[in-house]
Image (cartoon, rainbow, N blue to C red):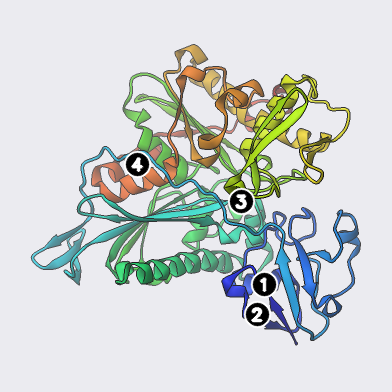
Amino acid sequence: MARIFFPQFRRGKEGIKISKGTILEAARKIGVEIISECGGRGQCGKCIIRIEKGKESLNPPTEIEKRFNLGENERLACQAEITGNKDIYVFIRSAGKFSILSDTLEDKVNINPFVIKKEGKVVLNGEIIDEERGKIYGLAIDVGTTTLVFQIVDLETGERITTFAEKNPQASYGDDVISRIDYTMREKEGLKELQRVIINRINKALKEINIKKGEEISNKIYEVVVVGNSTMRNIFFGINVSSLGVIPFEPQNKEPINQRASYLNLKVNPQANVYGVPLIGGHAGADALADIIVTEIYKQKKVSMIIDIGTNGEVIIGNKDKIFTASCAAGGAYEGATVTSGVGAIEGAITNVKITDGKINYKTIGNKSPVGICGSGLIDLLAELLKNKIMSKTAKIKENFHITDSISISQQDIYELITAKAGLRLDQDLLMKYYGVTLEEIDKIYLSGAFGNFINVNNAILIGLLPPAREKIVKIGNGALAGARQILISQEKRKEAQEIAKKIQHIKPNEREKNFAYLVAEKMYF
């Protein structure tokens, strides 16, 4: 039996004893995140690790590993199997502190939560659930495919007490929702395992907050509101998501959910209500509904658009009369997946690129040495290649373009990026067509999420990711989290969310357009 150590992580410094299985499986057991976009099937090549010591306790490199350009002592965590009993020291290439957007709009709502203090008791919907013990708190959670963000909120004042943001620990089971759905279908306990890792990470964070604050804040959390796309929300509540992986790609449960915290093993007050915001349909989930709530497009006479670019892209268009939505797999390439030098928003990720007189200038997160290039940097890079005529308008380059000696972009990378942007842009244009409006008639274009918040809008327009209407674009930060918080502190907002969800029309352009593939191809070039 070998002991495996992950020195970069506090929880990995003591090591774990294991006699069989892969290093990826060992990491999962102790909650050490290793990016594995393909779910550990040896397809993505992202779970690169360096064996500092103990490689004799592992199997020889596999044929799959030989396909990837691995350095000396590097392995794929999903392929490196334990065969010996000597200690193994593992360093993870993609490890690093993530820069995650938690900033949101200010709440302009009347504070009217479902939990109140009354005659020395804590009352939830008319039911006494606890003795009054000072403050009463709520928890707003945004479970993204890539990130996990939550805020503890004072339910009497609306004050944000603390914010937590980290990479979603489910990433080691697959980088996108299809990989996670596939995992729940392949593994007997897959759904429970994915639910467990997300609940456990929230519990651990709450425990850390209690210690930092010097009091049991978590036990005074009496209501929790959860948003996420259809897959993420339903996994959180332990609901089967297999139907989202097969035609017609619809969730089993779209309705709002109310469960006791004790049932979910969520370490807040055991009598707390955990509310799952309703889903819209298909992969358009509670996060998209939260964007609608916080922008209040459903109250406006003029038509507006919301674009939320994440691992899944959501496009929403509407006003007080009607709202249409469409979703597509938009952000994977721009979040590091399928791009050779692509990484998430970790320290050392290149975020901005500028080419002047042939000289390349760039900035990295944390001003660290460059480890790869993240989404905002990829948009800048495409725009700069185009402006400097290094890339043609048909997205062709003569050879790999190097930013540094080890960080470059290839023709295949460019193909992945233009395919991702084409799908999102096509959804924008088709939704306007179905709705019966032109770009000139759109009042505002809201950009929600970290990706939209950090990108250079002019460059995003230049490459065709966003429509050419710079003056209409408004960045709203983490709209999903802001919407979850408003639904937490306002009964009116929750009622509105439930009513609106039933009226929104979710459209699937790929089913509606016979020549959809041709239309996507048209949007791929510049």
Q: The disc labelled 4 sits on which kind of residue?
A: Ala
In this view, 352 is above or below 241: above
Q: Please name the residue shown 43% across and 34% down the image.
A: 476
Q: Could you say where residue 390 lies in the image, as x and y percent from the top left?
A: 80, 24
Residue where numbered disc 1 is placed: 6
- Horizontal arrangement in the rendering, residue 158 relative to residue 47 (left or right): left
**Upstream in sequence: badge 1 or badge 3:** 1
Q: Secondary structure at mark 3?
A: loop
Q: The disc labelled 3 sits on which kind of residue?
A: Ile
Q: Please name the residue shown 83% across and 34% down the image.
A: 411
Q: Could you say where residue 33 lies in the image, as x and y percent from the top left?
A: 63, 64
Q: Quadrant of residue 37?
A: bottom right
Q: Are marks 2 and 1 in contact (CB under 8 Å)?
A: yes
Tag 3: Cα neighbours inside 10 Å, few (<14), some, or many (≥20)? many
Real-space Cα separation, disc 4 to disc 2, in angstroms: 46 Å
Residue where numbered disc 2 is placed: 15
Tag 1: Cα neighbours inside 10 Å, few (<14), some, or many (≥20)? many
Q: Is residue 488 visible?
A: yes
In this view, 442 is above or below 308: above
**Upstream in sequence: badge 4 or badge 1:** 1
**Upstream in sequence: badge 2 or badge 1:** 1
Residue where numbered disc 3 is placed: 346
- Horizontal arrangement in the rendering, residue 497 relative to residue 480 (left or right): left
| 348 vs 227, nearest the viewer | 348
Q: Are marks 2 and 3 in contact (CB under 8 Å)?
A: no
Real-space Cα separation, disc 1 to disc 3, in angstroms: 18 Å
Residue where numbered disc 4 is placed: 497
Q: Could you say where residue 407 lies in the image, as x and y percent from the top left?
A: 77, 43
**Residue mark closest to the camera, 4 vs 1:** 1
Q: The disc labelled 2 sits on which kind of residue?
A: Gly
